[in-house]
Image (cartoon, rainbow, N blue to C red):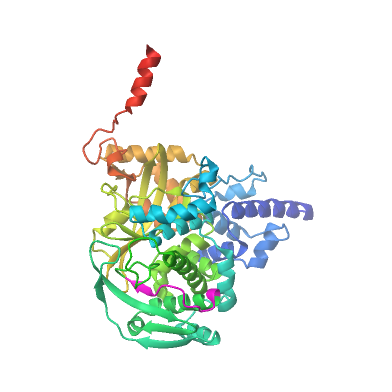
Amino acid sequence: MATKSGLMRKAHFLGTKIKSLRKRNRLTLEDLSVRCVQIDAAAAPSVSYLSMIENGKRVPSEQLVRIIADIFQKDINWFYDESLEDEAMDPAPRTSAVAGMPLEPGFLFSDELLQLAIPELLAQTGTTGRQFAHLLIRAHQESNQNRFPDLERAAESVGKKQFPLRIEDLIDIAKSLGLKIRWFDNSTFKDKGDLDKPLNTLVRSFFDAPNQIYLNRSLEDTPARLKFDLANHIAHMVLHGGDGARAPQISGGRVSGRRHDAESPNMDAKDILFAWRDFECSYFAAALLGPKTAFRQFLARHSYGIDAGRKIDLTTTLVMRRMSSVSPYPHWHYFDAYPPGNLRAVYRGNGIPLPWGNMTMISDPCQHWAVFRMLGTRSNRPSAQISVLESSGEKRLYCCESIRSKDAAGNPHVLCAGIDLAPALQAQGIDSASTIEQIEAACNRNGGSGPIPTEARRQLESIGKILNIGWIADGATKDATIICPRSSSCPRDKHCLGRSKRRRRPKIDEIRESLQLG
């Protein structure tokens, strides 16, 4: 019969190991409880019971240990060997997609000179205030890993963390803030906006100071979009007192963030203000409709399925963009692309290079990115892809899930959410560089895309279970592919454009070398 001290020792080691695994993977007690429910609802522990286990006050049953072993992909014997691992590996994330650099002489970059020079720079390059603002906002998002607790708290104070919210709930919130709702009828029309080719355009809604929301009656046919627009205007009332200084909500030709009545192609200070307010209100709306803890648990229950929002009338766009803000795993990226290559929204977590720009289209984007593949299909089903990306001599491993959709005006576009897999591999003690090399070699043996080797596939499937992201395993069953930012710099052994990978050295380097040799 086990002694009391023996049971306490057993409880201590089990609790410490479970807590270490949970912390390593950035899960809260609530997150771990939800994961246990997914596997076995009857045996899943409550949050309080998990806390007692981690503190050595309770000994978990063998059934519960097996559940936790499955979640973290550990052999059950590991929990009982009474030895503690070294400190959990937690590689430092690359938090900024745009690397900062000291610029000299510093006085040239003073606030006063920049405010004088930037409008002239934009005017001479034909860059609109909206485009410039989006670059600044994107850098702000990426430096904060797309997490803004002040906006989260503001949304939760209004919505009381209720989830899910119905249209009636949002109307009640709007009325409590003194907002009035009016409907208008307006169909789609053609508008070129900032693009060369006109797109279908729909004015979905707009705000008139001090408290009037105008909604297009066509939104009644799509409750998910109606909910988002209502939440967006509630955000304007809460954050800016309903002063009316913001862009209308438009789908299609006129890109959001630019005033609908603005015709100047150059700098307009209001464009920057409106773009920032659009970002704030959009983030607030997503936090209102998907409060952090509840939405995180919702995603966990559905293994981060990008179309899970259909069950509760949330747009796929909102679900995919919200993932990067609520997931315990911080290494995400997100694209919203319109053909042939126009970015409406982008979040570049971990510094993923872009295959094209959102200010001007480039002539040679790598066509092997999942988002480009989806732009050329008619399928509306989600598709996962594992990719080896080489940029500036660095190799990375990504998994993404893409889906082709239509906006409120009927224009096709592709939504893509993905993660950097290397930090997840490293956190589990796996040599990510070796895994990437295995997958890259397999791709090159097959002309640039090929089946993932067995050992690497097993590792990715394990990571998918640990992160609880179902589409990682889906991607691992398909051919991986080598991608890069530019086709002209293709890293494949067999260049996708049929060119040699060898680049000509700069002439000055040749001159220097000849002088040194002489």
Task: Between residue 102 and residue 482, name the one nearer to us.
Answer: 102
Return the residue found at the far top.
518
Establish if 80 lies above or below 417.
above
Task: Between residue 184 and residue 74, name the one nearer to us.
Answer: 184
Rendering coords of residue 449 (x, y %): 29, 44
Q: Name the residue located 54 percent from the left edge and 46 percent from the top edge.
A: 427
Confirm whether the magenta stretch covers residue 401: no
Establish if 181 lies above or below 140.
below
Q: Is residue 464 visible?
A: no
Rendering coords of residue 290 (x, y %): 50, 71
Task: Between residue 293 and residue 61, name the one nearer to us.
Answer: 293
**Residue 225, picture quadrant:** bottom left
Horizontal placement of 115 versus 444: left or right? right
Q: Please identify the quadrant where the N terminus is shown.
A: bottom right
Rendering coords of residue 371 (x, y %): 32, 56
**Residue 334, picture quadrant:** bottom left
Establish if 451 lies above or below 23.
above
Q: Name the residue located 73 percent from the left edge and 60 percent from the top edge.
A: 57
Establish if 489 lies above or below 125.
above
Rendering coords of residue 22 (x, y %): 60, 55
Q: Looking at the magenta stretch, what is its main secondary structure?
A: loop
Magenta residue span:
239-251
Count of numbered badges drawn on the protein: 0
Q: Name the residue located 25 percent from the left edge and 40 percent from the top edge.
A: 447
Horizontal placement of 417 versus 368: left or right? right
Q: Name the residue located 37 percent from the left edge and 19 percent from the top edge.
A: 513
Return the residue found at the far left.
498
Q: Is residue 478 visible?
A: yes
Task: Between residue 86 and residue 207, name the one nearer to us.
Answer: 207
Q: Please identify the quadrant where the C terminus is shown.
A: top left
